[in-house]
Image (cartoon, grey):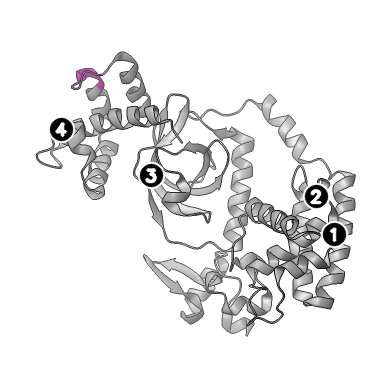
């Protein structure tokens, strides 16, 4: 997030500009100061923001008239907002220094956006990706948003998630993660080494660890759980091995095996006595000869790494997919619908867009 003094400076400058825009366009009557603008409802502030986006010449008029006696440095910051980027973005990934916003348009661009006074996780929830609408602004050496962030309540299936990952990779190759505006392409010389690094084969250590882990989960799952667990655990282990660098080269295979089984178990409520199969997660740790804290730590690391959550359709057992509400809910015309009970043409459309795992009638 911004430092408190930076956040206060941004709100001072932005509310001053918007107060000026409101006065010129006569959108909200009676607002005479930036402080009065800041306490307006979200709906009114959105209308003024739209007024500015439709009349960007007002930004230059504000700088020219300087109605609130801003300093030269402050006017320079406001002037940089002519490079703002407005639209819809996929809030894609939380990183240490910023949150990645993927532009929705045809050209994939990944913006590293700093929050203002509250973490994005508090604003839109912990489960990503999320489709949101906002305005990105340059602020000193960062990219921020203008304080108005609207999210769409849409759940994304595995196909959409994979597509977003591809867009993210393409954006990083072309531009890197954009942390200043306007956007500038990376020089070709900077792109080639990154491309070469991505094409390297997995280290021998990761391959050997993968073989050992899969041997453990392939033995454990059919004996103690079922074959569906074995398949998903193998898939998750292989996904871990493909990361660069692969985390499997660090830590012991039995710790990773316990973490993998725990992760699939969390998604499918393995610990719930009403489920079949059922097993306490601490028993998983014991079966692989690791402590409970080790198994928990590996599972938490895996879930954080791949944004895995309970009811995650990508890691749901196939036999339980039809009962997983997260796999079937999509937004249509502003309404959230359960496609299991939707007309066949709606199901086909959702399936072909990668929003649901299969067409229920055909599958059943």
User: Residue, x 72% and y 30% (percent of image)?
Assistant: 192
Q: Earlier in the sequence, mark 3 or mark 4?
A: 4
Q: Nearer the viewer, residue 294 or 224?
A: 294
Return the residue at label 1.
Answer: 213
> Where does the magenta region start and end?
63-67
**Real-space Cα separation, disc 1 to disc 4, in angstroms:** 66 Å
Q: Secondary structure at mark 1?
A: helix
**Real-space Cα separation, disc 2 to disc 3, in angstroms:** 38 Å
Task: Find residue 151 and report its horizontal and vertical position in percent.
Answer: 40, 54
Q: Are marks 1 and 2 in contact (CB under 8 Å)?
A: yes
Q: Bin the neighbour count of mark 4 within 10 Å (Cα to Cα): few under 14, some 14-19, many 20 and up.
A: few
Return the residue at label 2.
Answer: 248
Q: How many marks?
A: 4
User: Residue, x 41% and y 28% (percent of image)?
Assistant: 139
**Real-space Cα separation, disc 2 to disc 4, in angstroms:** 60 Å
User: Residue, x 48% and y 46% (percent of image)?
Assistant: 105
Return the residue at label 3.
Answer: 134
- Above or below, 114 against 207 in this view is above
Q: Nearer the viewer, residue 212 or 242?
A: 212
Closer to the camera: disc 2 or disc 4? 2
**Real-space Cα separation, disc 3 to disc 4, in angstroms:** 23 Å
Q: Earlier in the sequence, mark 1 or mark 4?
A: 4
Q: Are marks 2 and 4 in contact (CB under 8 Å)?
A: no
Q: Earlier in the sequence, mark 1 or mark 2?
A: 1
Q: Earlier in the sequence, mark 3 or mark 1?
A: 3
Return the residue at label 4.
Answer: 24
Q: Secondary structure at mark 2?
A: helix
Closer to the camera: disc 2 or disc 3? 2
Horizontal side of residue 183 vs 30, given as left or right:
right
């Amino acid at each position: 997030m911004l430092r408190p003094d930076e956040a206060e400076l941004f709100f001072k400058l932005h509310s001053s500009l918007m107060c000026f825009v409101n006065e010129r366009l006569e959108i909200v009557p009676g607002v005479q100061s930036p402080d009065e603008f800041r306490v307006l409802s979200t709906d009114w502030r959105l209308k003024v923001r739209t007024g500015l986006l439709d009349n960007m010449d007002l930004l230059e008029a504000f700088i020219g008239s300087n109605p609130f006696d801003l300093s030269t440095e402050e006017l320079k910051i406001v002037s940089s907002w002519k490079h703002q980027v407005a639209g819809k973005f996929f809030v894609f990934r939380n990183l240490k220094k910023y949150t990645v916003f993927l532009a929705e348009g045809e050209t994939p661009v990944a913006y590293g956006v700093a929050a203002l006074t509250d973490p994005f996780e508090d604003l839109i929830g912990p489960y990503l990706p999320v489709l949101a609408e906002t305005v990105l602004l340059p602020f000193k050496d960062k990219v921020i948003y203008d304080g108005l962030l609207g999210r769409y309540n849409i759940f994304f299936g595995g196909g959409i998630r994979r597509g977003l990952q591809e867009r993210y990779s393409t954006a990083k190759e072309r531009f890197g993660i954009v942390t200043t505006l306007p956007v500038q392409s990376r020089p070709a010389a900077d792109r080639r080494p990154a491309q070469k690094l991505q094409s390297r084969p997995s280290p021998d250590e990761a391959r050997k660890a993968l073989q050992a882990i899969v041997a453990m989960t392939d033995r454990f799952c059919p004996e103690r759980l079922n074959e569906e667990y074995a398949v998903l655990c193998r898939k998750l282990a292989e996904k871990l091995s493909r990361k660069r660098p692969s985390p499997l080269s660090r830590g012991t295979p039995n710790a990773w095996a316990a973490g993998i089984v725990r992760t699939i178990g969390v998604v499918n409520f393995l610990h719930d006595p009403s489920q079949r199969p059922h097993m306490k997660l601490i028993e998983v740790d014991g079966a692989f000869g690791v402590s409970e804290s080790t198994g928990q730590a590996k599972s938490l690391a895996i879930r954080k790494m791949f944004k895995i959550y309970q009811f995650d359709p990508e890691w749901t057992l196939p036999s339980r997919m039809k009962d997983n509400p997260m796999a079937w809910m999509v937004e249509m015309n502003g309404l959230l619908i359960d496609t299991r009970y939707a007309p066949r043409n709606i199901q086909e459309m959702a399936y072909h867009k990668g929003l649901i795992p299969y067409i229920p009638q055909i599958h059943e």
